[in-house]
Image (tube, rainbow, N blue to C red):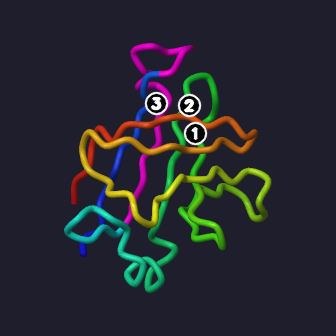
Amino acid sequence: MTWKTIRLELARTPEYPEGLAAHAYVLRLPLDPEGVIDEEAFRAERDRAAVRRLWRGEPEQSGLVIRKRRGWAFSYEPGDDDDEGIFHLETHPIRLGEYLTLTEAGGERLPFKVVHCHD
């Protein structure tokens, strides 16, 4: 298991057919050799699992990657109101070129591509 720094950038959408690097997340997560979250390492050091939301035209937000009853989320404030869900993060490998679907706090689902993943 190794803690990795991961950058996700908005992938192709109808609004942004080429994607948009200015809409991004930078994560710090423990990954196993297959690129899946190591939940044991996560439980041992939850406060180390961080997220930064970099969104063009908005202030940067910093928070934590949290485990919820129904999956994973990015959380910036206490409570659920601002949480952004991550579809199948518990089983989906995080590797260069892979895609993840995030659900914004307002309910919109957006695709993101892993463009950077290193120790």
Q: Earlier in the sequence, mark 1 or mark 2?
A: 2
How far is disc 1 from disc 2 in space, using C-alphas? 7 Å
| Quadrant of the snapshot with the C terminus | bottom left
Q: Amino acid at mark 2?
A: Trp
Which residue is painted at 64% across and 67% down in the image?
A: 70
Which residue is painted at 42% across and 28% down in the image?
A: 11
Inspect the magenta stretch and tell me whether residue 88 lies in it: no
Q: Is 34 left or right of 63, judged from the image as shown?
A: left
The residue that label 1 is drawn on is 60
Q: Is 100 left or right of 116, judged from the image as shown?
A: right
Q: Which mark is residue 10?
A: 3
Where's residue 84, x and y in %? 64, 50
Query: Badge 2, how many Cα within 10 Å: few under 14, some, many 20+?
Result: some
How many numbered tags mark residues here?
3
- Magenta range is 13-29
The residue that label 2 is drawn on is 55
Q: Nearer the viewer, mark 1 or mark 3?
A: 3
Q: Earlier in the sequence, mark 3 or mark 2?
A: 3
SS under mark 1: loop
Q: Is 92 left or right of 118, judged from the image as shown?
A: right
